[in-house]
Amino acid sequence: FNVTKSSMSLTIQAHQVFCGLATLIFGPVSDYIGRRKVFLFLQLLLVLSTTCCACAPSYHWFVVGRVLQGTGSSSIAIVLAISRDCYEKEEERLKVGGLLFACMLLGPLIAPPIGGFLATRFGWRSSFFMLAGVSSSIFLCSYFLVPETSPKAPKSSYLRAVWRIVANKRRFLLLLLMALYKSTFSILDNNNAFMLETFLGAPIQQASFMVSILALSGASGVLASSLLGRKPVE
């Protein structure tokens, strides 16, 4: 697209920002209209937006695709909500949630070397075409296999639920610490490949391999914490 590397790096940040904003919207929406409908909608949006990125004729269309792709990626929140619906005991929820997070980190673990190989051999668009194919397969599997799990109990107000967190000092401080950790990690994660290529002169495949090593350490930590079997503490 004849743009700078920093401009391309901004598309990753836009992806992350809209993923976070969409999570705040579609998570509560799934409480009211059902998990399955929202999950399938976001999965389909992910397929279409990834295809848009792969076929983008200009940088502006690529940015649009990345923004919509980030919105579709917020389906992760629905996956966690579904797991919460399926397990009543908090100990089981924590264990399953940890395993889910570990599985989610498999993407950052295996995607960089595969994407780096495809980009080097067949061009950067090939990575998005492959991702669109994988997303399509996941959407079809979800359509036939994922049931509706939203509980039938009366739904509480969204603002009331937010206030319960803000009014509880311990929960609010925990939320702030998690936000600080996630934002710091996202800054590093989004700029690792850019810094390795720009300042250290590492080729795409080598930079992708180094990013995978960082993802492996994160996945190992999440998996270890999920297997400890510790009970939740209020």
Image (cartoon, rainbow, N blue to C red):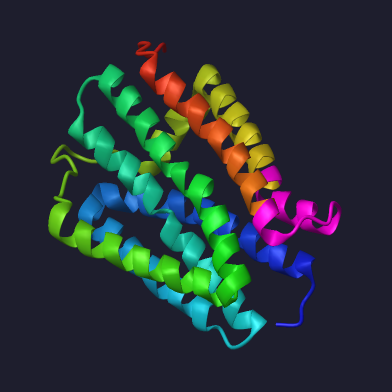
Count of numbered marks: 0
The residue most toward the bottom is: 57
* Residue drawn at point x = 43 percent, y = 28 percent: 164
Say whether residue 195 is magenta: yes
137 sits to left or right of 126: left
Q: Look at the picture and state if 33 lies above or below 84.
A: below
188 sits to left or right of 152: right
Residue 45, image x, y percentages: 38, 69
Q: Nearer the viewer, residue 210 or 96?
A: 210
Q: Quadrant of residue 194?
A: bottom right
Q: Quadrant of residue 1?
A: bottom right
Q: Look at the picture and state if 154 lies above or below 207.
A: above
* Residue drawn at point x = 62 percent, y = 38 percent: 214
Residue 88, image x, y percentages: 20, 24
* Residue drawn at point x = 50 percent, y = 61 percent: 70
Q: Look at the picture and state if 92 lies above or below 147.
A: above
* Residue drawn at point x = 63 percent, y = 48 percent: 209
Residue 22, image x, y percentages: 46, 56
Residue 34 visible from this viewpoint:
no
- Prevailing SS of the magenta stretch: helix
Say whether residue 69 is magenta: no
Q: Look at the picture and state if 176 lies above or below 9.
A: above
226 sits to left or right of 39: right
Q: Nearer the viewer, residue 54 or 71?
A: 54
The residue most toward the front is: 121
Q: Which residues are magenta?
A: 188-206
94 sits to left or right of 62: left
Locate the C terminus by quadrant.
top left
Residue 30 visible from this viewpoint:
yes
